[in-house]
Amino acid sequence: MIMDTHLEFQPGQIVSLEHGDKNLYAEVIEVVVSRQLCWVRPLLLANHTQEPPLITDLRDASDLLWPIQLFRPALDTEVITLLSQVFVKEPQGEPDLAAKQQLHQFIQQMWQENHTQ
């Protein structure tokens, strides 16, 4: 029997959604096993088209319910430096419009890619 590692995500774990040169890193809030969804709280969007990556703080963005099979566990080595750049600043309380638009565009692109195949 093959175990689906996605079902082993734990609350508080950092996971990643990848699309092109961008990674959305989010904290798992809950795994909804019956619907194969993962409830996550976005932390940051990393755009790897340049070095160092361009980081967008999404800590104040809305939570997402997203298909669990699209996530992968984030490696400590990949997120520690990214998160340290975000966590040195206090959350703004309300995400800026540009951050909201970047998250919306990323999610829209992921949705289109995974529903046109």
Image (cartoon, grey):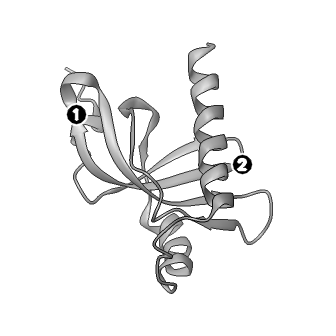
Amino acid bearing label 1:
Val
Q: Which residue is mark 2?
A: 21
Determine which of the numbered discs, if any, sits on residue 12 in the image. none
Q: Residue furthest right?
A: 50
Q: Is residue 112 rendered to the left or right of residue 76?
A: right
The quadrant of the image that shows the C terminus is top right
Residue 105 place in picture, x, y as percent: 66, 42
Residue 9, image x, y percentages: 26, 46
Please tell me which residue is depicted at 72% across the width and 58% down the height of the picture. Answer: 48
- Residue 69 occupies quadrant: top left
Asked whether, in this view, residue 95 is left or right of residue 73, the answer is right
77 is higher (above) or lower (below) than 31: below
Instruction: Judge whether 60 appears above or below 113 on screen.
Output: below
The relative height of residue 32 versus residue 30 in the rendered view (above or below) is above
The residue lying toward the viewer, choosing from 85 and 63, is 63
> Mark 2: which amino acid?
Asp
Tell me the quarter of the picture where residue 13 sits: bottom left
Which mark, by number, is residue 32?
1
Tell me if label 2 and label 1 are in contact, CB under 8 Å.
Answer: no
Exactly how many numbered labels are in the figure?
A: 2
**Who is closer to the viewer here, 6 or 90?**
90
In-front residue for pair 100/56: 100
Location of the N terminus (image quadrant): top left
Give the alpha-carbon distance from disc 2 to disc 1, as whole Å.
28 Å
SS under mark 2: loop
Judge depth for marks 2 and 1 and give the one in front.
1
Provide the secondary structure element on which disc 1 rests: strand
Q: Which residue is located at x 26 percent, y 23 percent?
A: 35
- Residue 85 picture location, percent across and down: 56, 80
